[in-house]
Image (tube, grey):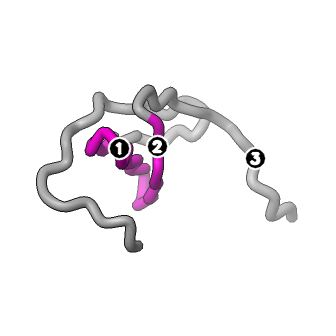
Amino acid sequence: MSTTPVLTGSVAEPLGAAFVAVSGNCAYTLAYSAGTVTVVNISNPAAPVGRRPEPVRGFISERV
């Protein structure tokens, strides 16, 4: 069994993703400089579907 990651699909992130978090069938990308978050449905890894970026209201911290 291989433990090497393999790219199976991708989504264009025009604002650039600085951080990514995954929970269940969703990936959340944060474009830190633009102050936006994008939700990506990854239930089908070969064909992920991203929504339009939404503004983040409040304070954005680089701490994880």
Part of the protein shown in magenta: 16-37
How many residues crowd mark 1 within 10 Å: few (<14), some (14–19), many (20+)? few
Q: Is residue 39 above or below residue 63?
A: above
Judging by the rendered image, the residue that carries numbered circle 3 is 6
Badge 3 marks a residue whose secondary structure is loop
- Image quadrant holding the N terminus, namely bottom right
**Mark 1 to mark 2 CA distance (whole Å):** 9 Å
Residue at point 81%, 58% (across, down) = 4
* Residue identified by numbered label 1: 33
Say which amino acid is labelled 3.
Answer: Val
Residue highlighted by disc 2: 17
Q: Can see residue 26?
A: no
**Separation (CA) of disc 2 from disc 3:** 19 Å
Q: Amino acid at mark 2?
A: Ala
Distance from Cα at disc 1 to Cα at disc 3: 28 Å
First in residue order: circle 1 vs circle 2: 2
